[in-house]
Image (cartoon, rainbow, N blue to C red):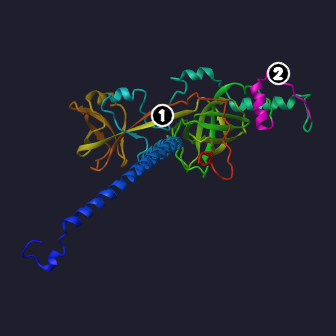
């Protein structure tokens, strides 16, 4: 112990022998712990291998689930975009932005202006698509229907009567058809065709949305149609149900009004009930709309409306300088004969272009307000798409109140 240290301090100072014995004991403890650490390393390596194997198993098991989740996310994003488009259409019906990369006279070259949508003439035989060469048209459909049913009443048929049990022999039936009916264990329904019912035409169906279906439905979307005794797939074109000779196209199938769905399909004589089903991604078919067959008429005019908008830049007594409707001088001169209107009820026309950036001097029947909007309405006739498909897949069956998609996920779990 050094000199000058107190007894209390000396108690904390160890002798050399005690220090050596303590260090030797620590070394022995370290030597004893080495094999345990080695054993623990071996054990941890085996545990890591087991954990890696389990992770691989989990990855292989969760891969389909991640794919399904990605598909659901894509479907939800597409549905959200449709909701946005439907809401935009309700707030600003038929309004479109004039493109800046393409001249308006080229972008809207198939459109025309009408002085009156109700009274202006429109030839139903002009600019018909090639699909109209494949369909059949009646000069007077109601008279043809009466004639066909009158002939059926006059003819004396020697066929089977109601209530008889008969044997029917069918020739040249594919084996796949027989096997499918044997697997389904469903009855086979036979029906005869009236004259002209084997020909194609344009069917107009008067339908109304079912209250149980709330998702947005756009025109030209594929649906499953039950019309009379037939069942097929088609892409209907929805239009307003009015008594005029021209009917405005509806971009979306709204739930509050009845619309007319125009499709290419085999001729069917009314009365015939109509059911529309929406084919979902999981195989289910949800009831979309109900209605009846309205007519078989290819001459029904379904007109698409486009509204171009501009804003008043300078306002005078009955004159105004309008901008942002067009973006070059040539477009202003091209659409000069088309009548203008405003959201506040003013009517006018284009007098002359100003400059080279699409500004134009317009004259109206009264003074405009600064918050008013100048509109130009253009029209174009549209036709249905030829997507008739007589083959319709069987809808996925519902079991215990669960949808097919949920049932598949439960099975995977």
Q: Position of residue 360 (x, y in %)?
A: 26, 35
278 is higher (above) or lower (below) than 145: below
Q: Evaluate whether residue 288 shows in this view.
A: no
Q: Residue at x 29, y 43 (%)?
A: 311
Closer to the camera in the image, 322 or 408: 408
**Sequence order check, earlier mark of 2 and 1:** 1
**Residue assigned mark 1:** 120
Using a 10 Å C-alpha cutoff, classify the residue at mark 1 as few (fewer than 14 neighbours), some (14 to 19) or many (20 or more).
few
Q: Does 264 appear in magenta?
A: no
Q: CA distance from mark 2 to mark 1?
A: 55 Å
- Indicate yes or no whether the magenta region holds residue 168: yes
- Can you identify the residue that label 2 sits on? 171
Q: Which residues are magenta?
A: 165-187
Q: Nearer the viewer, residue 338 or 355?
A: 355
Q: Quadrant of residue 190?
A: top right
Residue 388 position, x and y percent, is 62, 29
Left or right? Give the position of 259 relative to 305.
right
């Amino acid at each position: 112990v050094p000199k000058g240290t107190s007894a209390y301090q000396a108690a904390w100072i160890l002798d050399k022998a005690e220090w050596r014995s303590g260090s030797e004991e620590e070394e022995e403890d370290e030597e004893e712990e080495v094999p345990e650490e080695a054993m623990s390393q071996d054990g941890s390596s085996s545990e890591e291998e087991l954990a890696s194997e389990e992770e691989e198993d989990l990855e292989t098991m969760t891969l389909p689930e991640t794919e399904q989740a990605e598909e659901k996310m894509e479907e939800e994003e597409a549905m959200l975009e449709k909701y946005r488009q439907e809401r935009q259409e309700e707030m600003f019906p038929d309004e479109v932005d004039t493109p800046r990369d393409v001249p308006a006279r080229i972008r809207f070259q198939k459109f025309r202006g009408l002085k009156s949508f109700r009274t202006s003439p429109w030839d139903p035989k002009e600019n018909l698509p090639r699909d109209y060469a494949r369909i059949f048209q009646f000069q007077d459909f109601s008279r043809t229907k009466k004639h066909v049913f009158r002939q059926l009443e006059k003819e004396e048929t020697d066929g089977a009567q109601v209530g008889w049990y008969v044997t029917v022999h069918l020739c040249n039936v594919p084996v796949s058809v027989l096997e499918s009916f044997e697997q389904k264990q469903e009855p086979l329904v036979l029906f005869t065709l009236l004259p002209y019912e084997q020909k194609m035409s344009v069917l107009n169906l008067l339908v109304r949305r079912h209250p149980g279906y709330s998702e947005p439905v756009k025109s030209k979307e594929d649906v499953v149609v039950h019309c009379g005794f037939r069942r097929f797939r088609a892409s209907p074109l929805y239009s307003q149900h009015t008594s005029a000779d021209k009917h405005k196209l509806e971009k979306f199938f709204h739930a509050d009004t009845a619309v007319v769905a125009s499709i290419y399909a085999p001729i069917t004589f009314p009365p015939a009930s109509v059911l529309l089903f929406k084919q979902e991604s999981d195989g289910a078919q949800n009831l979309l709309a109900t209605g009846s067959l309205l007519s078989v008429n290819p001459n029904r005019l379904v007109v698409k409306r486009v509204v171009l908008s501009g804003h008043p830049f300078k306002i005078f007594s009955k004159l105004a300088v309008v901008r942002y409707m067009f973006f070059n001088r040539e477009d202003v001169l091209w659409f000069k004969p088309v009548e203008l209107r405003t959201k506040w009820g003013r009517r006018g026309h284009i007098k002359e272009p100003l400059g080279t950036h699409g500004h134009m001097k317009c004259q109206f029947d009264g003074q405009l307000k600064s918050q008013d909007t100048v509109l130009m309405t253009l029209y174009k006739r549209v036709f249905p798409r030829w997507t008739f498909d007589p083959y319709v897949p069987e809808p996925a069956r519902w079991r215990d109140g669960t949808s097919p998609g949920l049932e598949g996920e439960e099975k995977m779990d």
